[in-house]
Each structure stands twice: as C-alpha cells, then as structure tokens.
Amino acid sequence: MIGDIPAAATKSPRAPRRREERTLHAAAFTNGPNELFDFILPLWAGAALGLSATEVGILMAVEMALSVIARPIAGVLSDLFERRYVAATGAVLYAASAAGYALAQNAAAAYAAAAVGGVGGALLWVAVRAIISERLAEDSAVFPRLLASQETGSWVAFIAGMVLIGEIGFDGVFWACAGACLLAAALLLSAPRRQDPAAVRGGGAGGAPGTTGPQGAAAPEGAKGVAGSAIAGLGAVGRRLRPMLLAVVVTMTAEAAISLLLLMHLQREFDLEVIQVAYVFLPGAIAMSVAAERLHGYVVRFGRTRILVCASFASAAFAAGLAWAPNPVVIAALWILSGLAWAAVIPIQQAVIAEASGEHTGRGMGVYESANLLGALIGALTAGMLYDGADWTVACLSAAALILAGAVVVPRAVRSLGVADVPPPPPAPEAEAEAGRAPEPETGPEPETGPEPETGPEPETASAPEARARPGTSPADGTAPPHPKGFLTKDSAAKSAAAKSAPAKEEPPRSREQLLRELGRHAVVFTVVQVLLMLVGLSWLRDLVTQDTVDVLLHGGGQESGFARVVEDGGKIWVFVLVGHALWTGAKCLAMAVGRGGSD
C-alpha cells in the first residue's frame, strides 16, 4: 500500500485524466461541424441542390428523427462496450455524413448523409458524455469543462466557416468538417482504456448486477441474457430519471423556442443574412466557453438548486428584454446573458443525470439526449406558432414565462432524484499536478489487481518498537530492507513522492504584473499590425471608426470578396480576441484584489 490507499487504486493516475483530455479535444473538433451544419445546411440545400422549403425541412427532420431513435440505443452500447470505440464510431459516421454532403448531387444523397449524421451524432455525444462522467466522483467540474470545449469548438468553427465559405465554397467547408471529425476519432482511439471496471459492475440506479463486465464487456451469462437485461436496464433508468427528463424537455423547449424566435426576428425585422446572424450569436457562445468552469465555483458555493433558479431568472430576463431590443447590437449583448445562464444549467443537468444513473451512465445519457431533442422539436413548433400568430412582444413574454416555469420544475426534479445539492469542490490544481506526476506502471493492469494490497500493512504493524521508532530500518542492524513491490511504508512513500515531485514543481500562478505585461505585449503587436493594415487599406478597425458603426459590425468593412476580405475579417476577429483578453485579464486582476482584501 501507499499510505492508506491500495496500490491498485493508484497504479496509473494520469490515464483517466489523459482519457478525459482527449475526449474534450474530440468534443471540440466535432461540435464545431455539428453547430456549423445547422446554419449552412439550409443554405446549401437551396443553393446547391435547389431543394424546396419542404424538402429542406425533410432533410433536417431526417437527421433529428434518426438521432432521437438512436440515442437510447447508443446509451446501451456505451454501457456494454468500451465507450471510446462507440464515440469514435460516431465521429467517423459524422465525417462520412460531411463527405456525403460534399458529394451529394440530389435530394436522395443528401437525405442519406443526414441519416448517417443522425446516427453518428447519437453514438458520439452519448458516449462522450458517458466518458466524461467517469471522473465525476473525483472532479465535479468535468461537465463544465465539456461544455467549455464544445462551445469553443462551436465559435471557432463559426468564425472559420463564415470567413472561408466565400473562398472554398460549401464543398470545401464540408470536407474541412470531415477532416476535423476524423481527427476527433483518432483522438478518441488514442485515449487510454477505462481503468475502473468495478464501477461498471456496481449496483447503481435502475440496473441489475451482472449486466456488464470489465471495460464494459458483456457479462458471462450469455449474449441473450445481456441483451435482455440491457433493455430492462434502459427502462429502469428512464423511470428513475423521469422527473429530470421532464424538466429537461421544459428547459430545452424554452431554449429552442427563444433561439428560433430570435433567428426569425433578426432575418425578417432587421434583414440580416445568415453570416450576420452568426455574428449576433457569437458573443454568447464565447461567453459560454469562458464562463462554464467559473460558474461551477458558484454551484459549489451556493448549491445546484439556487443556481438553477438564478439562471432561469437571467434567461427569462433576456427573453423579456428581446421584446424591446432596438437593434442587433443590443440583442447580441442580451444573448450573452442567456449564454451565461445556459453555461450554468447544462453542466448541472448532465451531472445530475450521471449521478442518478449509477453504473448505467450511458443509458442515462441516452434518454437525456433524447429528451433534449424532443424539447428542441416542441420548441421549434411553439416558436413558429408564436411568431406567426402573436405580436413580437407577446411571443417574447410567452417564452419568458416558459423559462420561468423552469425555475420551479428543474430544482424540484433535482431534489426528487436524491442527489447532492452541493457538489464537492473540484481538486486543487496543485493536487492535480502532484497526481499527474506519478509514474505510469511498467506492467499491465491485471497483475496489479491481485491480493497484494491486502497484506501490505501487516509487516509494518508487526514490527518491533525500534523499527517503529526508525521507520524503514531493520531491527537487527538498522539498515533499510528492500521493500517488495507495492509495500511501502507511509514515511518512505512520502519521501519518495517528495523526491519525485521536487524537480518538476508546478509553476506559481502568474502575478497581476505578469498578466498585465502579457496583455501589454499583445496590445503592442496588435497595434503594429493594425497600423500596417491601415496603410494598405485593409483595416476593419478603421472602417469601424470612419463609417457607420452598426453597419460595419454587421456587414463588414469596404472589402467585398477575395483575399482582401479574408485579411480584413482576420483583423476583425483579432479585435474581438484582444477585447476578450483584456476582459479576462481585468477579471483575473479584480479577483486577485478581492481575494487579497478578503484575506486582510
């Protein structure tokens, strides 16, 4: 044993984190194409294939229908088999779907690509969330990190796609998305295997023991018995999660309704094109990616139900504010408020589902994803009826009322499942670094799981008083006897750990002066490049100052197309990056000042 921890529990502390990190990277690479497709597929279907509005609707419905059907099945597969294989299969199918769109010449080929994408998305996202949940017990911030990765991939893909689509066309964007999905599949396949088979065999919610074995493999009762218990486990998990699933349907109905209402309002009332609409939604996506982990600190401090109530009020305030928003710039600012609300709500929902599902996390995530899609479908239908049949102000206030209902429904659902309202705080960075520096085992996992840890403490407890007085020495001659593998005293283990950690000590957190110096260097480089762009007439920042500000924000500067437009758009993106860097630095400096004042 190492101290009081069995050696089997510490045999490869870096592997679960490496598994999580590669899954997070894969989520970023695949969520970008996923979100980008929602914007460009209707445009592509009409422009490239000449599909009617009805046929475009069928195209989108095919993907959604297949995804709804496949997600519970994907949950069962994620519990029965190694999850990274399930997720990688989904990523490959996503890539095949993108390639199918690039090669499609008619509606039938497009429908086939949409069907493949629906199945691929189900396999990918259910398995990814199940993988991320594996470390939830030791790190409560895993789902905020997942949301941050997804939203980062989303807004990066939006910017790249919108900037490049004029140069490489729809087909080029589809092929780039296919390449990103294949890279995600490679990341998933290179991740370590799951190292805690006992968690799969435990007696969690809604399932019968013996349905799965190590690494998610089928138990030895036979394939027929495993299939039967898998179906039974899916139904049991669904019944246990029913309160939360109903709450998810309500919240997703509200989110989908307000998003679609806003989309139609921007297109019809302000005559914005799809690219310009994307710029309105962009600040909210960036806010979600930046704020998800930080908001988790408030969840740990105040509890899940309080944060859910506050998030519902914030989102309802956004929906109500849309009724009187005068222009797209104000709407973009309000959308940040909605993004912050969902950055708090979505990780809480996923963590609650994972905790309540027990060892059947895959099944729980499968029915959770299906509830999400069902809510999105209801929300889309509701938004259409509200927009056509009611005044814009009435539509916004109706959506706000639906969101406020979530302030009652969702906290009650969390309490009804019996999960903890206040999650444990995530491990400190220092503890993560210490664990990450532990050496990987030389041998495979199976030889380490024998009975050795059970007998480790006995030589130490049976030793003579002299040996206890001088830990690590022999009673006869005072020399240190060799310890067999896996049998370290607490003192020697501490010395060994200290010796190993000393040369690779973590860098201290950056001071306020260092943060400000980094921002200053960034600003200097930015200024030099902007001066050069102004001299050659390609500065978006100059156009913003000298021309109509709102028009330049929404439509761009004076460059119409070609390489000059790409350069100008790149300068525009850099402006937002610098502003984000400045806001982040200011927030960090303010947090340091507040922390120092509180400690005084």
Image (tube, helix red, strand yellow):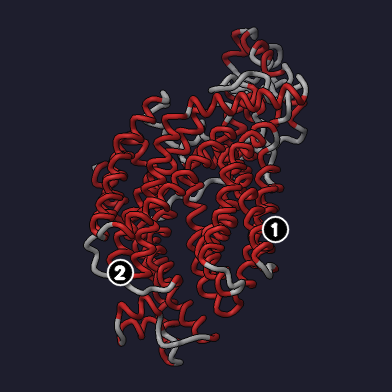
Say what amino acid the circle numbered 2 marks: Val
Q: Which of 542 and 413 is in front in this view?
A: 413
> What residue is shown with label 1?
96
Say what amino acid the circle numbered 1 marks: Ala
Question: Is residue 7 something one can see in this rendering?
Answer: no
Residue 329's mark?
2
Q: Nearer the viewer, residue 190 or 333?
A: 333
Residue lying furthest bottom: 536
Q: Quadrant of residue 74?
A: top right
Residue depicted at 41% across the width and 32% down the height: 423
Tell me the mark number nearer the camera, choosing from 1 and 2.
1
Left or right: 71, with 320 as reference point: right
Residue depicted at 25% across the width and 43% down the height: 598
Q: Where is residue 592 in the image (x, y as percent from the top left)?
A: 31, 51
Q: Where is residue 389 in the image (x, y as percent from the top left)?
A: 30, 57
Q: Where is residue 95 in the image (x, y as percent from the top left)?
A: 67, 58
Q: Nearer the viewer, residue 72 or 594?
A: 72
Left or right: 556, with 157 as reference point: left
